[in-house]
Amino acid sequence: MNYLSTDDIDNAKQWVDTAVALKKNPLQDIELGKNKTIVMLFFNNSLRTRLSTQKAAMNLGMNVMVMNFGSEGWQLEYGDGVVMDAGKSEHIREAAQVVSQYADVIAIRAFAKLENRDDDYKEEVLQSFVKYATVPIVNMESSAGHPLQALTDAITITEHITKKRPKVVLTWAPHPKALPQAVANSFATMMQKMEVDLVITHPKEYDLADHIVKDTPVEYDQNKALQDADFVYAKNWSAYQGENYGSAINFDKNWMLTEEKMAQTNDAKFMHCLPVRRNVIVADAVIDSSNSLVIEQANNRTYAAQIVLKKILEAKK
Ligand code: SN0
């Protein structure tokens, strides 16, 4: 079993309920991972993902090895039949098989390069490990998705639900850099599995992929979208569609979430995956309010990772 995208969640409710139970009793499966090793490979920066996944593994009694592959590993070649006489030192074929010999699970973070849409959505790094490794693979944010974050967000929303079908708004927000669509993609596909009414809002230039949005309503007027929202999830992403792929073509500061905007909602909870640019994505008054769930989201990263690792370890038994 791999955990590559939210598609690998066979029963969202059961996974979320199990994670909530794990949160109450985090050490209940401390024997499950005994003498099992997770190797975590980072091609990009991390705070929450690294520490919460490590914590989850420790709660399951696993051994953990972490490597900042991007800065400390050899430059990897992914192409077949390449004459490796330039900068790349090692082929993924050897690297993935070698790491598999030390690991029972391999977890990988490899962000989008935001240069070429097809290359990013092929998820070359993640899929190459899937192809050549001989152990289960966990996605710790690939070029197209961040399914551990999305599972976390489902857990957090479930914990704070006060009505049968809450309105959940995923809103684009401005950012000085071009960021991947990964978090937004996985949040959207995860919410589609939940008993919620999801609305996506962003400036026109920021349409997400059709295979992500499916029949989710898209409202280009942020104020309209926010009406009566129960949860507001802010995230920046760069353009997906057309020739502007990967660029930050519009830095519209009016899309920042302010107290005035939140006043249009149904006293909505504020969510963000972090790290967040204060007073760019969200005003201090919103993130510091009692309706902000960002710290609890980060806490729930542990239980999202723990349910994923538990499922993988149980499938391997
Ligand atoms: C990443 C992203 O995919 O948007 C990771 C989020 C979990 N975010 C960033 O790279 C933010 C960097 C910045 O400078 O604000």
Image (cartoon, rainbow, N blue to C red):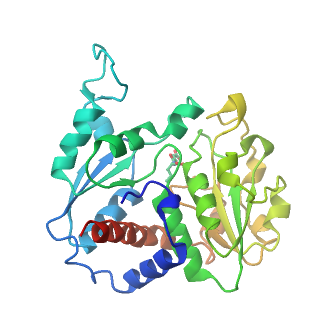
110 shown above or below 116: below
Q: Based on the displayed image, in which of its 4 quarters is residue 278 positioned?
A: bottom right
Residue 195 in sight here: yes
Q: Residue at x 78, y 46 (%)?
A: 203
Left or right relative to 83: residue 163: right
Left or right relative to 211: residue 20: left
Q: Residue at x 34, y 62 (%)?
A: 53
Q: Residue at x 80, y 74 (%)?
A: 228
Left or right relative to 43: residue 223: right
Residue 285 in sight here: no
Q: Residue at x 53, y 77 (%)?
A: 13
Q: Based on the displayed image, in which of its 4 quarters is residue 70 positioned?
A: top left
Quick one: quadrant of the N terminus?
bottom left
Q: Based on the displayed image, in which of its 4 quarters is residue 238 positioned?
A: top right
Instruction: Single out the residue that lies furthest toward the left.
Output: 35
The one nearer the camera, 130 or 303, is: 130
Q: How many marks?
A: 0
Across and down, in percent, residue 311 comes to: 35, 70
The one nearer the camera, 310 or 175, is: 310
5 shown above or below 289: above
Across and down, in percent, residue 224 comes to: 85, 62
Quick one: quadrant of the C terminus?
bottom left
Left or right relative to 146: residue 216: right
Across and down, in percent, residue 262 comes to: 75, 69
Across and down, in percent, residue 61 comes to: 20, 72
The one nearer the camera, 89 or 5, is: 5
